[in-house]
Image: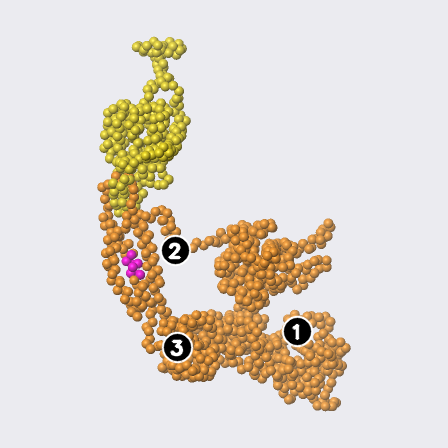
Amino acid sequence: MFTVAGIGFTAPWLLVALAALPVLWLLLRAVPPAPVRRRFPGVALLLGLTDDETQTDRTPWWLLLLRMAAVALMILGFAGPVLNPKPEAAGDDGPLLIVIDGTWADARGWPRRINRVGAALDEAGRAGRPVAVVRLTDLPEGDLPFQAAGNWASRLAGLTPAPWQPDAVEPAEWVAGLPDDGFDTFWLSDGLAREGRGALLAAFEAKGSVRVFESPRPVYGLRPARFEAGEIAISASRSRSAAAAVLTLAARGLDPNGVERQLAVAELAFAAGKAEAETALVLPPELRNRVTRFELTGIRSAGAVALTDDALRRREVALIAGRDDREGLELLSPLHYLEQALKPSADLIDGDLLDLLLANPDVIVLADVATISEGEAVPVLDWVEAGGLLLRFAGPKLAASDVSRGQEDPLMPVRLRAGGRTIGGAMSWGEPKALRAFAEGSPFFGLPIPGEVLVSSQVMAQPDPELSERVIATLADGTPLVTRKRIGQGQVVLFHVTANAEWSTLPLSGLFVQMLERLAVSTRPVQPAAEDLAGTVWVAHSVLDAFGAVGDAGDMAGVPGDRLAGAVIGAGMPPGLYASGDRSIALNVMGPETDLAATVWPERIAVEGLAVQRETALKGWLLAAALGLLCLDILASLWLTGRLTRGSRGVVALLALGLLGPRADAQGGDDLALLATSEVVLAHVITGDERVDMVAEAGLRGLSDTLWRRTSIEPSNPIAVDLETDELSFFAFLYWPVTPGQPLPSVEAYAKLNRYLRGGGMILFDTRDADIARFGQASPNGSKLQRLARPMDIPPLEPLPDDHVLTRTFYLLQDFPGRHASRDVWVEASPADAERIEGMPFRNLNDNVTPVVIGGNDWASAWAIDEAGNRMFPVGRGFAGERQRELAMRFGVNLIMHVLTGNYKSDQVHVPALLDRLGQ
Amino acid sequence: MTTPAELRQRAEALAAPLPELLAEAEHLAQAVLLGAHGRRRAGMGDEFWQYRPARAGDEARMIDWRRSARSDAHFVREKEWQAAQAVLLWVDEAQSMGFASGPDLPSKADRARLLALAVSVLLIRGGERVALAALGTRPRSSQLQLLRIAQHFTDEVGNEAAEYGAPVIRIMPPHSRALFVSDFLGDLAPVEAQLTRAADRGVKGVLFQVLDPAEEAFPFNGRTIFQSMGGTLRHETLKAGDLRDRYLQRLAARKGQLADLARATGWQYACHHTADSAQSALLWLYGALERRR
């Protein structure tokens, strides 16, 4: 390729034509612009007048220059100029393999990597080489998928990194086992040293030449947070440690409203030359228990996110003993072993039972407390039903009392026989009993039972029909040792022995601690060992992708506990939060001991950066510029010959305005305010999808018309609202059609939206897909809606109840169809204490307007009318369809009435009572 | 050989615009008559003018006894002198008069004919005698003369017409009045000669210049070839805009020349643009012809 000053030409011979430009100059100069012929009687007066500038009988020089420039641009353009031409490397014509590590470490610079791959594909495409693109984390089966470069280019956008690392051995074996031979390799490394890289490099070199590309930026990884001495210690590692760096660490979690927020921020400073940085956070327990993950802000990578699990969560355990501590006999205290077992991993509180309930602890331990007074029992029961764990231990007092004898006590899991039994003592026969292996289905299943655990006394359960399902641990002879009953969301667990060593050696053993752990009384202090998790199955609750975004796990298969303990992340076990029963374990990309190190390549491999200078074809630009110059030439010629009349001048001015002038902003701030506030106005959110916006606008126009005709609401034309720029508080009602492609609003826009919702505004979300998906199930629009609405302050929702005020604000309605007729319409949930008063047809429901109405019935399409007032879309079929449209219209009327009049109709049911009180 | 049917067809086509033109002129003239002019139409030569004391030499029958009886002196009743005037019209029919710069403007010839016919209507109603120079007839004061003039105006002007017009008047009664309507863009020498001849014979009148607005403003730019209406004269320029000032100077000089000529011969001169109202032009013409009467 012929190259001048960094610009190459594909057809350089055309440049010879530039030599003809001077000839063109002479030719053009000799031809002046054609004259206009005019009939004009006044010519008699003109005779004899001469022009002042005699040289203008030739084309003016600037017009000549314009034309010459246009012609020169055309010649240059057709010569095929290319910016940053790639020198063609000789001999590269065999197949090309592009290998991407595709790990979480790649995620941060993924677009640049894809860009680099794209450049390599372009290059290979020009050279006609077959290409295969392979991620080491997702090795293809069988042969290498060699294809034309163009095929791969169209699939590049779909490539994503995986949130795990490639296996140490498998890739090298895979390469060695490939039947293809003699291909070159481009290796886009993620920059992290790991086992097996050398072997893999050797395997690639055996097949052909290897070029390695790597970003010089360090890779950062955040290790899981640890709880140490009352504060949260969190450390990070990086792969390159040359320069000092300060990163921001953010702790995120749900606030009391269920909205995810940044709960705390800390700085993580890497000193120059150090690969490690550590910081500590001190958070109040309430806040600490809310943290769901730590992340390094500004780094999009799974390595920069550390999910938290029970290890960080400190449960509040209330300890209550039934008898007064005997002074000095610490080891005989009923709570001593519990305190020892729980102190490292839980916050212990003690006090009066009712006072403790106010603190809403996670667990209340009652050690040998027999009777709970009537006044205490009810709040305790409520607390258990709301999810509390009541852990009771037996003891002499319980054995002596008649609690749960004839009839099961609500706060006891089983009925008890009087007295209990003693085995293997001085006054009794038999040997102290050992424990039987835990049955499957018991929370303790899989725990090893040490031989020294012996039970000498216990209270006995009455055989009842439910007994067998309530037993979760038994002695060797089958008598229940631990029983459990679920109440509401909570449970009551009874150890049939004492909490101290009087009746058994259980509290002395490690098994006691493990059992407490399994019951989620205490929480796991360190990474669980394989045996701790043996026999359990863990189900992913949420998973991380390589970019560090937390996603729903969907219905992934469960993971056995021993694999989870191995903590080797792979395709079947992505990083995320795994739960089993009441416990949860976070599986992070970075383990507590993981160190990051930069790759070390052999001397012979030259590592190239990811920066790429793409070839840019300039032909189009040059030709467009030439065309522009020729257009200018037309105008100039017209002007010169005086043919530029006033009309055409206007056209030219308009053209110039259209080309150059920025589009005037149609809605100035004050204009919008005036427009929106001088009359009632319905508004819709601009989604960016032109068609959806048009339909939304037409729909609101149709609804406005209907309102005008049928009700005393007389709205003016609907307004399209840009969430980022427009003030929302002018509108009472926003229609928000959900499209998968619309951008998420900025933080400021969300703040505005939340202010709007709190200030009494209403948003009607319409996913418009009720024909194909039910609400809340995975449709693109539904999941987009979830993402859109997540940062918003939306109260709990429920499907629209039959007696909601929306059913009667104007029309009496039971269905709310739009273009689709799904019944899934969700509104703010009615308060739990809403009750139907005797004699009233409806419940006394919430007192304000629901801030959101969510559905997928595509109401706007049913409402939409065009400029001429005709319906834009058909609804249903025939008369039934028209009926459905009518109902859609009525729903719209009811909705706007609800927005504007609130619970007025709901209050009307009180009219008889009010009249009665007034003495009418 | 033309058949009678053909002949009639042509005659109809010829006659069709005539009443319209006449009506328009009548309409214009009617408006003038409605003004404060107050000249009655009944009877000729019996209009009262003034009473003057009788002088020696007055015949006794000339004394107005009724007036004299109211005082001691004798009065003679004088009547307005109302000998009918002859008014000669010359309307330029050269090709240059056919120019109109815009589609909504009348051509200069149209305006000139309209004004001339309207003046004729007025004069004939006033009892004057009117002649159109192009017809070559003697001045007459009859509706037939009006019809003839109108007929002449609606005749097609052939291509043989000159590029620029010059007044050619064969019959010019002494002490009559004259109205020359033209654009006066051609050579002024024949006009001057004609005026001198008219002044010699005691003829007074009006030089009425009709111009198109484009001729007054010269709104041209760029490279242009200007051609006269017949195409015999042409002038090429590269920047028409540059010529504007000099053209306007020449036009002003031409107007000045005409005004000087008029003043020297006792005539009146006015310039009228086709974009202006014909009504005001007619009023001015009426006044100008009236004043001398």
Give the alpha-carbon distance from disc 3 to disc 2, as whole Å: 46 Å
Image position of A676 (left or right of A94): right
Residue A69 shown in magenta: yes
Q: Position of residue B22 (x, y in %)?
A: 38, 30
Q: Which mark is residue A96?
A: 3
Q: Indicate which disc, 2 or 1, sits on the residue closer to the N terminus.
A: 1
| Predominant secondary structure, magenta span | helix
Kindly indicate which chain is depicted in yellow in the rendered structure. B
Q: Amino acid at mark 3?
A: Leu
Q: Which mark is residue A614?
A: none
What segment carries the magenta color? A67-74
Q: Is residue B82 above or below residue A628?
A: above
Task: Identify the residue at horizontal 25%, vertical 31% (top origin).
Answer: B191
Q: Indicate which disc, 1 or 3, sits on the residue closer to the N terminus.
A: 3
Give the alpha-carbon distance from disc 1 to disc 3, as whole Å: 61 Å
Q: Mark 1 = which residue?
A: A490
Kindly indicate which chain is depicted in orange in the rendered structure. A
